[in-house]
Image (cartoon, rainbow, N blue to C red):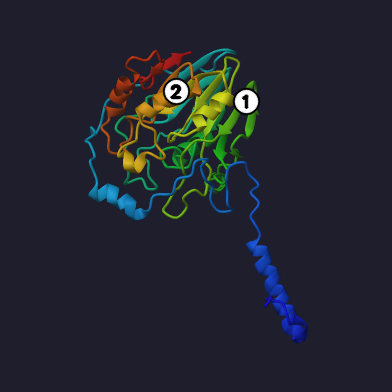
């Protein structure tokens, strides 16, 4: 029998109450209409090739029962690089990998910083968590005036609030972040940000910057996984297209980027933080996959990032470099392991 049959026989008060209840139930069960281009269910974002989040118990299994963590040095004395140029001219591209995924990209007279971190630790607290093993190879005080900061996602080694506050106070750059990350910045007094959906464009002077899908996830704690958007950036310049992958696993998006951006002249691809594979593979490429991504992007030149500064995973500090060299054997590929702090001209 239909739920509403016999409704006319009920007293008016109960009839009104039941009709209201059915209306609420109908509205709540209506299909959510995603306003974004990135997959979103009203609470969480998802990858183009979804993978389930790791549980807290899986994390404990890795950390305490399946741990094959290699030793890193406590400290390495890396020299400071030379003070960067104030500005490039049109058609000029200079890049300096400062540490981890922090790159100073100077192109067409615009100064861009990617995932900047000058903090001692990648952690919600200052007294615990992964600690850097070398100093940032460009002093913060030596940075040229930064126009744009590109943030790939909200993990602590990529979205570092103390560094962003220093940049905001001294440089007042435009900070590009994925959707739903703005509240965190605003809470810290940072107002000059733009939240970006996948495929969204931002124009600055002669550059066009596009936030693109990659294969990763987001979280600042245990209960907010996938709630803010992650991605990589394409920078369209007068010389061609430059790709910053941020942090990513391997996915079909590499080939898709090649179709949409056929003139990628320079890519920054992660080569570290990939072991153990049973835990890291969905969201972190290893050096062999970085080479595969380079080929599928059609990138003319690639640069390794996301290695050698913080011990986040099990592999040794030099393993990404050695594994990349092994993967490049017999291939006519331009893929550089950069010297931290050294400026390179394209």
Q: What is the spatial separation of the Cα atoms under label 2 and label 1, in whole angstroms?
A: 22 Å
Tell me if residue 279 comes above or below residue 247 in the rendering.
below
- Label at residue 294: 2
Asked whether residue 146 appears in the rendered view, the answer is: no
Q: Is residue 88 left or right of residue 16?
A: left
| In the image, farthest residue toward the front | 1
Task: Name the image quarter holding residue 134.
Answer: top left
Asked whether residue 240 appears in the rendered view, the answer is: yes
* Badge nearest the viewer, 2 or 1: 2
In the rendering, at what x and y percent does residue 86 appear?
Answer: 52, 18
Pointer 1: residues within 10 angstroms few (<14), some, or many (20+)?
some
Q: Residue at x 45, y 47 (%)?
A: 219
In the rendering, at what x and y percent does residue 147 appear?
Answer: 57, 27
Residue placed under numbered mark 1 in the picture: 208
Pointer 2: residues within 10 angstroms few (<14), some, or many (20+)?
many
- Label at residue 285: none
Q: Is residue 125 left or right of residue 145?
A: left
Tell me if residue 146 comes above or below residue 15 in the rendering.
above
In the rendering, at what x and y percent does residue 84 appear?
Answer: 46, 18
The answer to which of 17 and 232 lies nearer the viewer is: 17
The answer to which of 145 and 301 lies nearer the viewer is: 301
Task: Name the image quarter holding residue 75.
Answer: top left
Q: Earlier in the sequence, mark 2 or mark 1?
A: 1
Task: Name the image quarter holding residue 332.
Answer: top left
In the rendering, at what x and y percent does residue 57 appear?
Answer: 33, 55
Q: Residue at x 69, y 72 (%)?
A: 22
Q: Secondary structure at mark 2?
A: helix
């Amino acid at each position: 029998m239909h739920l509403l049959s016999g409704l006319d026989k009920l007293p008016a008060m109960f009839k009104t109450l039941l009709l209201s209840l059915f209306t609420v139930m109908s509205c709540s069960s209506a299909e959510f209409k995603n306003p974004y281009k990135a997959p979103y269910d009203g609470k969480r974002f998802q990858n183009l090739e979804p993978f389930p989040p790791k549980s807290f118990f899986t994390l404990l299994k890795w950390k305490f029962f399946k741990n094959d963590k290699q030793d890193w040095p406590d400290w390495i004395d890396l020299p400071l690089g030379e003070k960067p140029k104030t500005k490039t001219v049109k058609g000029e591209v200079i890049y300096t990998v400062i540490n981890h995924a922090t790159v100073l990209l100077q192109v067409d007279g615009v100064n861009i910083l990617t995932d900047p971190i000058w903090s001692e630790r990648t952690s919600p607290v200052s007294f615990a968590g992964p600690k850097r093993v070398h100093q940032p190879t460009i002093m913060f005080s030596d940075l040229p005036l930064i126009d744009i900061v590109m943030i790939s996602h909200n993990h602590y080694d990529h979205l570092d609030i103390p560094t962003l506050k220093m940049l905001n106070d001294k440089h007042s750059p435009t900070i590009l972040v994925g959707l739903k990350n703005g509240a965190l910045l605003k809470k810290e007094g940072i107002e000059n940000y733009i939240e970006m959906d996948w495929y969204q464009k931002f124009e600055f002077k002669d550059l066009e910057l596009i936030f693109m899908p990659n294969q990763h996830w987001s979280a600042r704690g245990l209960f907010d996984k996938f709630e803010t958007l992650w991605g990589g950036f394409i920078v369209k310049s007068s010389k061609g297209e430059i790709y910053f992958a941020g942090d990513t696993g391997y996915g079909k998006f590499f080939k898709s980027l090649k179709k949409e951006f056929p003139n990628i002249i320079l890519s920054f691809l992660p080569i570290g933080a990939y072991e153990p594979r049973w835990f890291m593979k969905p969201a972190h490429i290893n050096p062999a996959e970085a080479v595969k991504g380079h080929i599928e992007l059609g990138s003319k030149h690639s640069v390794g990032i996301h290695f050698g500064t913080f011990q986040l995973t099990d592999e040794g500090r030099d393993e990404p470099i050695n594994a990349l060299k092994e993967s490049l054997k017999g291939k006519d590929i331009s893929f550089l392991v950069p010297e931290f702090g050294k400026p390179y001209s394209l």
